[in-house]
Amino acid sequence: MARLARLSLAGHLHHVIQRGNNGQAIFCSAAHYQAWLDLLLETSKKFDIAVHAYVLMENHFHLLVSPGSDDALPQMMQAIGRRYVRYFNTTRQRTGTLWEGRYRATVLQVKQYLLPCMAYIDLNPVRAGLVDNPLHYPWSSHAHYLGQVTQKIITPHALFWTTGNTPFAREEAYAKLVREGLSSTQLHELTDATLKGWALGDAEFLADLQKKTPRRLKKSRPGRPAEAGKPA
């Protein structure tokens, strides 16, 4: 069966995951992390992509973005991927591939999944046992949303501004959300949908999204298609 094309739709929220080949490290020093972030800042502006959240782990990364055009996300990921591999291979005196195939991505319904996905991303280092508090991990957007640093790369989504009337109120609301964490169901939904490429949202959202793309947005039910005149 041919693999599904990745979803990439202008103006929609996308969760992106990319991993190192065979689980290998893609960041081996602070310079590597910073070089990748510099590329993200440059290419997101070039291709008109709003970066809402990110985390860079040793062997993978997550992004939460809204592209300005249907082609923007694949163009940005291709540009970063090629340039970073050249940089990484040069600094490590190696050759060959770095990525585990193509990046994984899907579209999320904003009202249901923006804030949970931001928390999901920020809590990656905690789930990995690297820190007890996501604020102590330097390679994510978490500190930006808690007002500890200002990161030029980050563009808060419009929905984030509704979490409080002042910067302090928004920071407190988001810190509380992250402290409360995610349910096992939310963790599974966000991971599974992104890795498999199925859009995530309610029935109305998926129906509206389907009008914008011929690509299937959710997994077909198992079994043979129903015959005409018979219930599915």
Image (cartoon, rainbow, N blue to C red):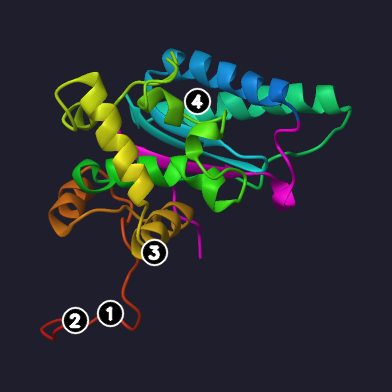
**Residue 211 appears in the figure:** yes
Q: CA distance from mark 3 to mark 1?
A: 32 Å
Q: Amino acid at mark 4?
A: Met
Q: Position of residue 68 (x, y in %)?
A: 32, 23
Q: Are marks 3 and 1 in contact (CB under 8 Å)?
A: no
Residue 147 left/right relative to 173:
right
Based on the displayed image, in which of its 4 quarters is residue 114 positioned?
top left
Q: Amino acid at mark 3?
A: Ser
Secondary structure of the residue carrying numbered label 3: helix
Earlier-in-chain disc, 3 versus 1:
3
User: Which callout, 1 or 4, points to the residue nearer the camera?
Assistant: 4
Q: Amino acid at mark 1?
A: Pro
Q: Amino acid at mark 2?
A: Ala
Q: Position of residue 186 (x, y in %)?
A: 34, 58
Based on the displayed image, in which of its 4 quarters is residue 173 positioned?
top left
Disc 4 marks which residue?
Answer: 76
